[in-house]
Image (tube, grey):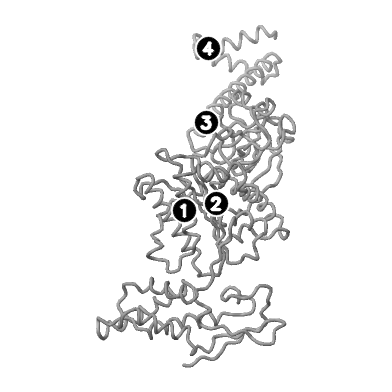
Amino acid sequence: MEQEQIEQTLQSLGDKNVPGLHRVQQVIDIMSGVKDGNADSKQVAREIFSRLENAAVDEEVKEKAEQLDAILKQVESSPMRPATFIGVHILDDSKREHATVIMDNGEMAYLPIANTHEVKRLKLGDRVMVDAHMKILVHPAGDGMHFGLEARFERKIDDRHIEVVTQQDLKSVLLSGPELIEQIRKGEVKPGASIVTGAGGHIGSYALPAPAEGISHYKFLDRGAIPDVRVDRDIGDPSPVIAQIALHVREEMTRPELRRKFRLRPCITRLLEGVSGSGKTLAIQAIHRLLYEIMSEITRVPVKELPHRVFRMKTSQMLSMWFGESDKNIDRLFDEVEQRAEEKFNGFVLPVMVVLEEAEGVGRHRGGDSIYDRIMTVVLQRLDPNREGLSNKLVVFLSTTNEPHLVDPAFLRRIGGSVVHFGRLDRDGFNSVLKKHVDGLPSEKPWKQIITAVNEQLFGESDRGVVALDFQGHQEPAIKYKRDFLTGALIDRAVQSASQEAWELSLGKDPEIGLTAGMIAKSLDHQVLSVAHQLVPENVHNYLDIPDGVRVTRVRRIPQNA
């Protein structure tokens, strides 16, 4: 049977206008011919079954396509995760294209593509969205956001790779998007510029713009309250450095031309050196307060309304575990100080004070640690009073140390335009400090009599000594007495202890009871002996005045009367 006849037969079977019984009879006749072995009937039957199979396949494909479309719509409407597009690749075990992406946690994935048309427009570094289970790339994110860790740009390697230095001061090679590469090619991104890295630090995504002139936020500015420490009220034996700095600031604010006549610089540096408890911090607090009182007097602005002008150079803030960050912190501090010093207030040039306590933490001897050597180099460069950034600005730089022998000599010269020694109190200093501490406290007798009595015990002949120090190369030991331990901090602790005893007695007996010479003397004895108990040859210089160049070989405690 010819193909044309077969088509006519099949068309008749599928024609709805032909009565159904007639079409059924046609099928019966065809099947009978197949049974009898008729070749034409077999050919028609084969064509019928072939077309029925194809029709079934088309329906199945249509059904599967509808299911896939529903799945894609469900994926797009469900939670998705952001990722960074790398490129399109054909995997070895698949002939279909897969998208290579990096998740924000740095994990890499090869995903089937839901919309191949949109993916063709993607470039390396573009943000995309994947389904929550990381099984398919859905569509571009289009958010244009750039965020992540910073790195320092070093150089362009090729059209896809750049070299950067991370916060750990390690060199790394990153992928880079074409836009960033084009910026680098045009010279818009110089070596040293900050690069935002995304995708877990694998891609350089964005070059940060260069900072604007000046600093908008002061990181190291002390915004705390002004210390309520007044020289006439709180310091019994004030160091001359307090009055010297006050005079310096007052004259610079009122008659700077007179100082320029003698070529005196506005910048002043002082190193306060001495044992713990000798009053260095108290002196700095008094200077802090005094500077604000001078500024208030000259500008006629209340102290509380004056701007913050004090910076704290804290070792914990300066030194970083990341190599290179400490240098940046020190540079940032000096940039802030110099900018603040240029800012006028109501037409007045106000002083800026920088405080570095425990200078040995930053300015230790060079040669032992390369990291500290590098930090010291930066500090010495920025802390030069002759440098233009400081020489013409009213900056008061104060630092303290209990361990001057640990401080680098060059640092001492820069930071200590003058070294001010804070030591233990002599008899006059002790009397002055004690008077300030007991002023206004209830007493059993007039304070003049009590202080005289305490003096006799501390500075009289009855003191047999507290410790005997053996020096290398010396036969006779050096006897140290109670009066050799006296500092402002020790007197403060002793008065507090005596006041505690008097208060406890007033609870059970006479509420009008006051302090006595015996209470204060006993408290002083207790404080001195507590210090003496801690002495060993290695730490004696922290608590007692020892001649330079002498080494203590032994500390012997002298028995005391009960």
Amino acid tagged 1: Leu
Amino acid type at circle 2 is Ile
Q: Using the image, determine if residue 188 lies above or below residue 311.
A: above
Please tell me whether mark 2 or mark 1 is closer to you in this view: 1
- What mark, if any, has residue 247 been given in the picture? 1
Q: Residue at x 62, y 51 (%)?
A: 326
Q: Quick one: quadrant of the N terminus?
A: top right
Contact between labelled residues 3 and 4, with CB atoms less than 8 Å apart: no
Q: Is residue 21 visible?
A: yes
* Depth order, front residue of 5/288: 288
The residues bearing labels 2 and 3 have C-alpha atoms spaced at a distance of: 53 Å
Mark 1 or mark 3, which has the lower sequence index?
3
Residue picked out by circle 3 = 143
* Disc 4, SS: helix
Nearer the observer, disc 4 or disc 3? Answer: 3
Q: Nearer the viewer, residue 91 or 520?
A: 520
The residue to which callout 2 is attached is 268
Location of residue 290 in the rendering, given as x and y in whole percent from the top left corner: 42, 55
